[in-house]
Image (tube, rainbow, N blue to C red):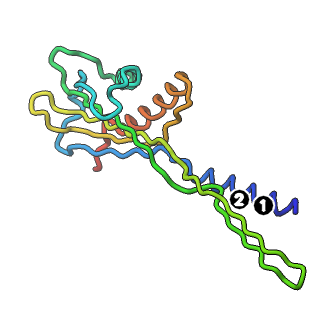
Amino acid sequence: MIMKNTMLVLALCFAMAGCATPLAVTSDYDTAADFSALKKFDWMPATGNAAADELLVKKFKNTVDVQLQAKGRTMSADNPDFLIAMDLSGKSTYGGSTAVGMSVGIPVGRAGTVSVGGGKSKPHEKKEGTLVLGFLDPKTKSLLWRATATAEVKASATPEEQQQKINEVIAAMLAHFPPQKQK
C-alpha cells in the first residue's frame, strides 16, 4: 500500500511539473533593414488588455531601456532611429483536472451490499501573459523587428519576483536583437 501511494505521488509530481508553461520567445525582422544604424529609440504608447497596469508597463519599459543601453542604444525623444511599440496582454487558460473519480460496489454472495461513490472535477486555471515588442521605422511606421514572449504569470508573485521574471523575459527577447543575418 505504501509503495502504491508513493508511486501515485511521484506520478502526480511529474505530471504537474510537465504542465508548467515555459517561456516561449519568437522573433522576426526585415532582412533589408540596416540594424547597425539603429542607435536612438523612443517609445510609442503601450497597447493590449494589460496595458492599463501602469506599474507593470513601467517595469517592462525600464527593463527594455536598461538592456538596450547595455547594447549601445540610447533613449532619445529627439529624432529617434526607431520607435518601440509594446503590446502587453493576458488571458486565463484551462486544462487538466483534479479529483475525478467514481466507484461502484457490486454485491457478491448473500452478504454483499451495494455502494456508490464519486468525486468532482475541478479544472486547473493558469494565467498566461504575452508581450510583443515591435521596433518601427519612425518615418514610415513600418516594422523592422519584432519579438514575442509568452509565459505563465504567477498572480501571487512579489514585486521583486515580478521584476526578476521581467528581466529574464526581456533578456530572452533582446537576445535576438540586433539580428544576426545568415551569410
Q: Which mark is residue 7?
A: 1
Q: Quadrant of residue 53?
A: top left
Hey, what amino acid is under mark 1?
A: Met
Q: Identify the residue at horizontal 68%, vertical 63% (top origin).
A: 118
Q: Residue at x 78, y 74 (%)?
A: 114
Where 110 sits versus 51, above or below? below
Mark 2 surroundings: few (<14), some (14-19) or many (≥20) residues within 10 A: few
SS class of the residue under badge 1? helix
Location of residue 128 in the rendering, given as x and y in whole percent from the top left corner: 44, 42
**Left or right: residue 81 compared with residue 151:** left
Q: How many marks can you see?
A: 2
Q: Position of residue 132 (x, y in %)?
A: 32, 38
Q: Nearer the viewer, residue 78 or 89?
A: 89
Q: Which mark is residue 11?
A: 2
Could you tell whether 122 is left or right of 69 in the image? Answer: right
Q: Given the current orientation, which residue lies at the most extreme left position?
A: 140
Disc 1 + disc 2, Cβ < 8 Å = yes
Question: How far, Cα to Cα, is label 1 from label 2?
Answer: 6 Å
The foreground one among 90 and 25 is 90
Q: Decide which of 114, 65 is in the foreground and name it.
A: 114
Q: Is residue 160 left or right of residue 182?
A: right
Q: Please, what is the three-letter code of the amino acid marked with disc 2? A: Ala
The residue at 59%/57% (across/down) is 121
Locate residue 143, reporting x and y percent: 19, 38
Q: Residues within 10 Å of mark 1 (few under 14, many from 20)?
A: few
